[in-house]
Amino acid sequence: MYQLGNLFGILTAVLFGGAIMNFVIKFVNRKWVVKLPKESKFKQGYASVMKFLVKNHRFFGLGAAALMVLHIVLQILFKWVSVTGVVTASFAVVTVMLGGIMFKAKKRTPAMLWAHRGAVILLNLAFIAHVVTRI
Ligand code: HEM
Ligand code: HEM
């Protein structure tokens, strides 16, 4: 069972990665891909991948949160209560809440976006501490 707990941890991280791609793919697009000629096949392919990632962003985030619950339950039952894990999970909850608020908001403000992004940065730092130390 504990291998399954670890697997759910890895899958949670993979889906978080998918959600973070929302930022990465738009950044690379702004910096390089928009400059390519209209006829570029790469540009067209890139645009469809970007559309998929941006459209499904919230499902990556919510999917990660669901897998996170499975990871937490199995780790608490078969391993230990990880302090760094609890910190990571708290930032994940805050990130999802801020994302949800922004998603529902009539008007999105830069402050909302930066709060959500800030929570993601903290989430990443806590996650690194979690997998490196395992405390
Ligand atoms: C967003 C939250 C979390 C993510 C993304 C996450 C992810 C991970 C990952 C990727 C691993 C390494 C698995 C491996 O190397 O096979 C791990 C290990 C672990 N996690 Fe989490 N985790 C989170 C939250 C938590 C929480 C809240 C707890 C406990 C209450 C927890 C308990 C553990 C434990 C005990 C291990 C160590 C397993 C070992 O060393 O054998 N995690 N986690
Ligand atoms: C915990 C997982 C999540 C992570 C790691 C994450 C990460 C990010 C990042 C890095 C951005 C910035 C993208 C940019 O610069 O344009 C962003 C934007 C955004 N996120 Fe999330 N997010 C998560 C969950 C969610 C959820 C659950 C929702 C909604 C229910 C959501 C809604 C949004 C919205 C509305 C934006 C504004 C930009 C856009 O529409 O794509 N996020 N997120």
Image (spheres, helix red, strand yellow):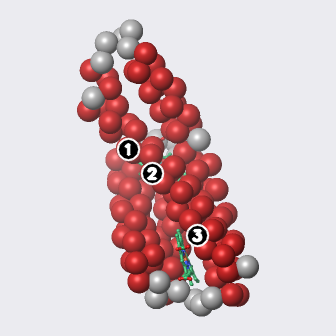
- The answer to whether the residue bearing label 3 lies less than 8 angstroms from the nearest atom of ligand 1 is yes
- Say if 104 sits above or below 85 in the image: above
Name the element at disc 2.
Answer: helix
Disc on res. 20 = 2
Expressed as whole percent of the image width and height from the top left, the position of residue 51 reads 52, 31
Q: Distance between the residues labelled 2 and 3?
A: 17 Å
Q: Nearer the viewer, residue 95 or 28?
A: 28
Residue 86 in picture, x, y percent from top left: 52, 81
* Mark 2 / mark 3, whichever is N-terminal: 3
Q: What element carries label 3?
A: helix
Q: Residue at 69% across / 72% down in the picture?
A: 4
Is there a contact, CB below 8 Å, between mark 1 and mark 2?
yes
Task: Kindly identify which residue carries mark 1.
Answer: 24
**Whether label 2 touches label 3, CB < 8 Å:** no
Q: In which image quadrant can residue 115 be found? A: bottom left
Binning the other alpha carbons within 10 Å of mark 1 as few (below 14), some (14 to 19) or many (20 upward) gives some
> Looking at the figure, which quarter contains the N terminus?
bottom right
Q: Quadrant of residue 56?
A: top right
Q: Residue at x 56, y 55 (%)?
A: 15
Q: Is mark 1 within 8 Å of ligand 2?
A: no
Query: Percent position (x, y) of residue 29?
Result: 34, 31
Earlier in the chain: of badge 3 and badge 1, it is: 3
Q: Residue at x 43, y 16 (%)?
A: 41
Question: What's the mark number on residue 9?
Answer: 3
Q: How many labels sit on residues?
A: 3
Answer with left or right where residue 67 lies relative to residue 116.
right
* Residue 115 in view here: no
Q: Does the residue labelled 2 lie within 8 Å of ligand 2?
A: yes
